[in-house]
Image (cartoon, helix red, strand yellow):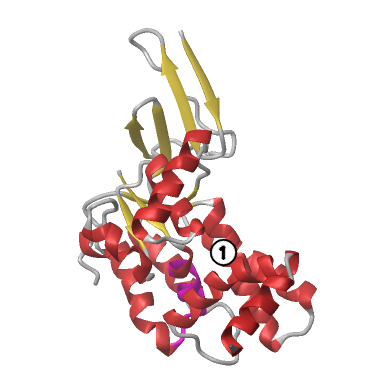
């Protein structure tokens, strides 16, 4: 079974789903469709959950001043996504040595700390590929540090 | 003899002999005929109920656009919102950072 690590922007763009993110939404659907002959598991981590909740809350509060409603709605929407049968919520066991690795990625690839955490999480969870719409990871794909899920499943 | 620990979806087994005992998570409802996907990497064994691809796709399609927003966001805007989280938290804890940033911009 193949494990695909999902970055937060993939989940958020799918849930918002306007015309502007039509291509991104199609890419997610194509990933599902391209797995007819092989089983996949979509891996969501606590870091991804944190970023999705932050983004949904921020988008919702633009039009609704009831912040408690926005919080509840963000959690409800994320929970709907996590309930999908192919989605697996997994938490890596970080160790003190991982901080060195995170630092190495930050310095080598000029990554933000959160992005470096995503890279380490995907490796610790033995994910086969990494699905993102963030170009900050491009250099890691080029240098084969990560395998680009959009290339693996020909969904560019 | 085997030791195991389990979370809601992952079962870990450490075999001391030739046989491995796999324990399903408590939340898993099993009926005759159900198929499971077994994934073994190092000492970790992951079991997941095999699902129909069409059902999964249908579930996913139903979720598209489930956030009620009054305007559309591009992927660049979404990435920006995600990135802003670091800055916002930092500004809340260390408000002078915001002032420093503004002064830098002005100068």
How many numbered marks are there? 1
Please state the chain letter of the residue tagged with numbered disc 1 in the rendered image: A
Question: What quarter of the picture does the N terminus of chain A occupy?
Answer: top left
- Say whether residue A138 is magenta: no
Question: Is residue A98 in sight in this rendering?
Answer: yes
- On the image, the x and y values in percent for residue B90 come to 67, 66
- On the image, the x and y values in percent for residue A59 come to 61, 80
Q: Residue at x 45, y 59 (%)?
A: A115
SS category of the residue bearing label 1: helix
Question: What quarter of the picture does the C terminus of chain A occupy?
Answer: bottom left
- On the image, the x and y values in percent for residue B74 come to 44, 85
Q: Residue at x 60, y 66 (%)?
A: B86
Q: Give the quadrant of residue B22.
A: top left
Determine the residue located farthest toward the bottom in the rendered image. Answer: B71
Q: Is residue A32 above or below residue B40?
A: below
In the foreground, B84 or B39: B84
In the foreground, A23 or A103: A103
Q: Which residues are magenta?
A: A10-18
Q: Residue at x 77, y 76 (%)?
A: A67
Q: Give the quadrant of residue B39.
A: top left
Q: Residue at x 79, y 72 (%)?
A: A68
Question: Is residue A121 in sight in this rendering?
Answer: no
To which residue does mark 1 refer?
A: A51
The reply, left or right, for residue A13 in relation to residue B91 is: left
How dense is the environment of label 1, judged by Cα within 10 Å: few (below 14), some, or many (20 and up)? many
**Most common SS among magenta residues:** helix
Q: Give the quadrant of residue B70.
A: bottom right
In the foreground, A77 or B77: B77
Q: Is residue A93 above or below residue B64?
A: above
The reply, left or right, for residue A125 in relation to residue A95 is: left
Q: Is residue B84 above or below residue A150?
A: below
């Amino acid at each position: 079974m193949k494990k695909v690590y999902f970055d937060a922007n993939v989940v958020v763009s799918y849930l918002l789903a306007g015309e502007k993110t039509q291509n991104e939404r199609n890419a997610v659907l194509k990933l599902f469709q391209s797995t007819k002959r092989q089983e996949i598991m979509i891996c969501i981590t606590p870091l991804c959950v944190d970023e999705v909740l932050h983004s949904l809350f921020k988008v919702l509060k633009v039009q609704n001043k009831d912040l408690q409603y926005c919080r509840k709605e963000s959690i409800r929407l994320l929970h709907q996504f996590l309930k999908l049968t192919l989605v697996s919520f997994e938490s890596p066991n970080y160790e003190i040595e991982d901080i060195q690795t995170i630092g190495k990625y930050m310095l080598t690839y000029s990554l933000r700390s959160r992005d470096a955490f995503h890279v380490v999480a995907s490796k610790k969870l033995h994910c086969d590929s990494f699905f993102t719409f963030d170009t900050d990871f491009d250099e890691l794909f080029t240098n084969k540090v990560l395998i680009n899920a959009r290339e693996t499943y020909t969904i560019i | 003899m085997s030791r195991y620990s389990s979370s809601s979806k992952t079962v870990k087994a450490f075999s001391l002999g030739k046989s491995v005992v796999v324990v399903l998570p408590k939340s898993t409802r099993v009926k005759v005929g159900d198929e499971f996907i077994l994934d073994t990497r190092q000492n970790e064994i992951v079991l997941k109920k095999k699902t129909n691809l069409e059902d999964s796709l249908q579930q996913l399609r139903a979720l598209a656009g489930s956030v009620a927003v009054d305007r559309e966001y591009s992927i660049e805007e979404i990435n920006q919102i995600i990135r802003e989280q670091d800055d916002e938290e930092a500004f809340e804890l260390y408000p002078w950072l915001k002032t420093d940033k503004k002064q830098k911009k002005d100068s």
